[in-house]
Amino acid sequence: MMSMVRFSTWQGDVIDNRDKKREHWRRSTSYFPEIHRVENDTEAFIGWDGFVLFKKDVDVVKLAMKYAAQYQVYSEACGRCTPGRWGGRILYDLLDKIARGEGELGDLEHLKEISETMQATSKCEIGKSVPTPILDIMKYFESSFLDLINNKKPSPEYLNDNTNYIADITAPCTDMCPSHVDIPAYIEGVRDLKFEESLKATKQTMPLAHVCGRVCPHPCEDACRRANLDEPISIMELKRIGADFESDHVLDFIYPTKKAKAIGKKVAIIGAGPAGLTGAYYLSLGGVECDVYEELPVIGGEVAVGVPEYRMPYDKYHKDIESIKALGVNFILNTKVTKEMMQEFEKTYDAILIATGTRISKKIRAKNERYEINGYWPAIEFLDQINLSVKWGIGENVDLSGKTVVCVGGGFTSMDVVRCAIRANAKKVILLYRRDEKTIIGNTSYEEYHEAVEEGVEFRFYSAVEEIITNEQDKLERLKVNTFELIPDPNGGRAKMNHIIGGDYFIECDYLIPAVSQSANLDFLPQEWGLGLTSWGTFKTFNNTYMTNKIGVFAAGDCEYGPMTIVNAVGQAKRASSVMLRYLKTGEVFLSDEEIMEDHLRKLKVYNKNEKITGWIPGIKREISEKLDTNTRKYSQEEVNFGLTRDEAINESERCMRCYYIAMVATSSNHKGLTND
């Protein structure tokens, strides 16, 4: 999205529209928060890569001073390097001196000298980047500084509070993480051997540390600035260090904050998967009484019954769950919520969080596709039976000896299906995918795909089932498969799939397992509630608050967004629980300034893949953890990934460049909470 700006220096692209009519303004190619809240226009934005002015007559000297004040607080708390600690203090003192009308000409040179020293010698990126916009302001608005110095007068806004300055600290990896985990902080905890502090940093926004230290698709690593230098840091595996330390040493549960006193409110949560668990965790920490209703006989949702033991050992997941139960959360299992129950919940609870996930496997749209076919086995049902048996001893074991299994899909669920089929002794396992190897790796992960290949899964790309062929007893016999080729889009869009005439072939098989996607079962919703749904059959929520169109009813996770990753579900539920807590206390539904800034920065895109990294030694290889050997793991449910050793973890954590950035908006000081009205 292109932004209308009056003046900008972002990423070195100077846009000066001050003397032009608005219709002749050059737009910025970056997104900037022109509106902070619905009722508040932004006057200015300042951050690690420059500054942006939207309004005329912005007090740029106070803007620079307030930005320096944000860094001063951070640098004094950090204190890891002299340029950062003392530089932050001097920057603020000099800018405040000028802003209050007591500056001298020599202060400008001193400011430039300190800024350039910080850029060259600070140990981390926040110390290197904070001076950038300050130097830009001094360069392009020098007359504003000279006016205050020569006339010994305060800046226009210095003595009043007509402007509200809202700041946030982020990092490229943190910004990319759907849960906004403070990644540099937990990596720093590992590096300093302060594993409890590492876990606390994670649990500020991610209670399922064991889970997301093992089965997260780690989008954060795609935004690691270290990749601009050599290789991204093994962020996911470092997350699990603090969690394993807590459980392996049988410590009391480590929480990021002390549980608040009870506020006298009670919430019903529908679903005990990652979203439901996360909502219960943060609401309970906030002093809310939580009842969690779950249809399955176990706690954990799809991670408990869908994610295989060899990827996510349940004893580790159990530690995450136990830390939530220890807060006093009440779980009601084997309970399928009905319309009548929801109507009763409306009367007996102060709010409701729906976190039911998506547990209906979608069809592949082949001819003769029917659930009744003997050998047609939807992915969710297949994984339920496998994992309830393996992890819980519930139901019959799945034995596929001598059988040929074909799975259709290209995401994590299909990967779990085929690797579980290998471990269930299938004679042959084939995965059909309409697109290419690169896309399936992007949908899952490099590790997951290559481990499946090593274990003997046969991948057939550019393939899709046209027809399911059965015998007279309606038993699956074979599949007719179409093959495709990619036709590039001349306009640069996504390539189109073209059916290759004459390229069709047949596969004889015993089982077909569709794993293309899932949908939500919302039969439990009272019709009179009139909850809005998307065209995908998921909940419509408003203004990033995760409240539905019915006051007091919230939704998060797969049932709100559609099938996604665990970390996405956790991130949504964390935001939903924060909004719910404010709703329970005030009766209003609104986002905090920090949450609004998170959304602004996500649109701006904190990570710059074209940035040239200097000041760091390149070529330091990424640590790779040991994996269970292929021949053993094919016949075992043992965890495949051993995790990083202590020395490997320390070495890997030392590769982190602590890429914290500060961003700040200046907006009118009076604003109300954001509501659905």
Image (tube, grey):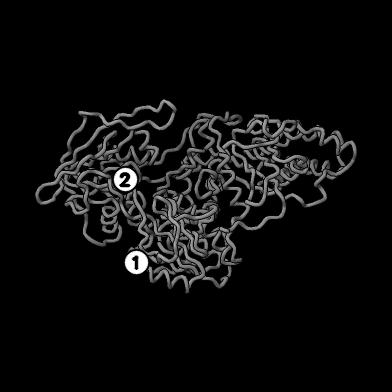
Q: Outermost residue, left direction?
A: 472
The dot on residue 516 is: 2
Q: Which residue is mark 1?
A: 336
Residue 574 visible in rendering: no
Task: Write the residue at 71% across / 55% down.
Answer: 670
Q: Is residue 297 left or right of residue 478?
A: right
- The crowd level at tag 2 (other Cα within 10 Å; few <14, some 14-19, many 20+) is many
Splitting the image into 4 quarters, where does residue 367 fall?
Answer: top left
Q: How far across and down, in percent of the image, does residue 60 sit?
A: 76, 40
Quarter that holds the C terminus: bottom right
Q: How far across and down, in percent of the image, does residue 71 sit?
A: 69, 44
Asked whether the beta carbons under mark 2 and mark 1 sit within 8 Å of each other, the answer is: no
Quarter that holds the N terminus: top right
> Element under label 1?
loop
> Element under label 2?
loop
Q: Nearer the viewer, residue 635 or 470?
A: 470
Q: Nearer the viewer, residue 221 or 516?
A: 516
